Image: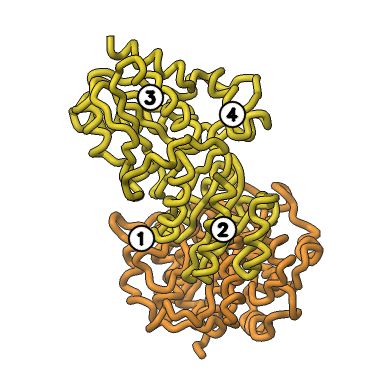
Amino acid sequence: MIDTVSLAKKMRRHLVEMTHHANSSHIGSGLSITDLVAVLYGAVLQIDSKNPQKKERDRFILSKGHAGAAVYAALAETGFFDSSLLQTYCDNGSCLSGHVFHKGVPGIEFSTGSLGHGLPVGAGIAYGLRLDHLSNRVFVLLSDGECDEGSNWEAILFSGHHQLDHLVAIVDYNKLQSLAAVSETLGLEPFAEKWRAFGWAVVEVDGHDHSELLKTFQALPVQQGKPTCVIAHTTKGKGISFMEHKVLWHYRAPQGDNYVQALKELGGE
Amino acid sequence: MKKLFAKLLTKAASQNNRLFLITGDLGFGVLMDYAEQYPDQFLNVGVAEQNMTGVAAGLAFDDRVVFTYSIANFPTLRCLEQIRNDVCYHELNVKIVAVGGGFSYGAAGLSHHATEDLAIMRSLPITVVAPGDLWEVEQATQAIINRPGPCYLRLDNTSAPTQDLSNSSFQIGKARRILEGRDITLMAIGGGALHVAYEAAQQLRELQIDCRLVSMHTLNPLDKEEVLDAARQTQGVITVEEHTIKGGLGGAVAEICLESGVLPRAFYRIGLRRDYGCIIGSQAYLRDQYKISAEEIVKQAKALLT
């Protein structure tokens, strides 16, 4: 098992470097899910970096595709490809696009970018795995703003009805969406109750507490016969003081003093 | 067409346990045999086409041939982005079946008129097939099961009476020449269109006009050679579709001719030439109203040849 705290630290440095180099958006979203993705790739997902297409494997779909840089960083740090590829992020001709992209990138299961696509696909994969008598799990990571999409609620209804208990939806609940707070835009509360009413088991966790996340993911399914929703309470921009809780860092790339300061806070030079 | 399709798919399911059918809560009296005989290869996802298409992509992810089934625009336009991103981009083996091409559900109203689907689906990297008669339904269903990758199958409620006129083998992407002729070519896609085109061809022959009739059952990939042969060998080309004239078969034929520099001496597109109207009616009634009729084809053919 990998030390996931140290993996997350490396991923955060990659995120700063990648968005700085590409002058691209979504560092706040990436930092928000870094701990979740680090725990999944470091300690939870049953996957083989040497054989990423092995049929008996857990599946991970990043439905909030705009945070793809975090997953690219995790894959590089866990041996799916060389970390030098990360330096091409968003470059002309690169396969590492701003929204997560599977073609040419070992370990990426599914390309997303338009929100509301990951959960229906994950539900279909989970349904198929059960038909094939495979016990592998399907993890889909969604954003809170993404839960505005009606297609998600179709899939939530479907998965509860079909008791897909090896399907796990993780919501990165950082309470900020593209322009403003979730509560001001389209409130989700009572959020856990909504999932429960659709037939899901729900756990609420601190999305940055590695031991709590690990304990949660090791105890799946939370309830036999029900899909699990992990509502992960997170901080957008987590780990870099001036980015935390700021919509601005959904868009801005770290440059100049911000870049230097960000690396310093992450313990780099 | 839909009952024959369901019968063929049921038979195919018995031979291939990786074949799967998902419906968006439609197919009463059509899919029941399949559902009863192969419950492990069938799913009714409810009235939720976006989820239907996403789930189909997920199921196809692990080596299944997955059919989605609904009527008119529901399995296409309602979930177009799922088809584009989830199915086409990932090159998955998902076969989208729309029952009720054109005005098949004419009396049901505008929501049920599939009159832009061919143009829209043609712009995606997906095989697009619209059989014109029952023989083509039978052939196309099997061909689609065997063809890897995304496919769209558009089934009409009308079939042309041409199922016994075939002397050729069916191939996706290869047009079927039903009648030979040197004066003019009628090129039709789908059951309703082939039906009126066949009727027009017979009337033209009675008028001593030697009419070629082609069933262009596959729009994507289009049989370029057959189009160019028509342009070179006959005096004019008329395309026929129960669909808007914008971007469908007529548009595709025009693109090929212009870009190849092989221009037909005369060219006309039979299809829907106006925006949404306020009338409803049977498939045949609406075809007549919108001049997708044998009478209109004959009129245009005579005008092109003078």
- Label 4: which residue? B283
**Colour chain B is painted in:** yellow
Q: Disc 3 or 4, which lies upstream in sequence?
A: 3
- For the residues beneath circles 4 and 2, the answer to whether they share a chain is yes
Local packing at callout 3 (Cα closer than 10 Å; few below 14, some 14-19, many 20+) is many
- Label 2: which residue? B54
- Front position among marks 2 and 3: 3
Tell me the kind of residue under disc 2: Gly
* Badge 2: chain ID: B
* Badge 4: chain ID: B
As measured in the structure, the alpha-carbon distance from the residue carrying label 1 to the one carrying label 2 is 34 Å
* Badge 3: chain ID: B
List x then y, in percent, for residue B172. 35, 49
List x then y, in percent, for residue B41. 60, 67
Q: Residue at x 63, y 34 (%)?
A: B105
Q: Residue at x 49, y 67 (%)?
A: B64
- Chain shaded orange: A
Local packing at callout 1 (Cα closer than 10 Å; few below 14, some 14-19, many 20+) is some
Tell me the kind of residue under disc 1: His
- Label 1: which residue? A21
Q: Against A213, is B107 above or below?
A: above
Q: Residue at x 55, y 50 (%)?
A: B4
As measured in the structure, the alpha-carbon distance from the residue carrying label 4 to the one carrying label 2 is 32 Å
As measured in the structure, the alpha-carbon distance from the residue carrying label 3 to the one carrying label 4 is 20 Å
| Contact check, label 4 and label 2, Cβ < 8 Å | no
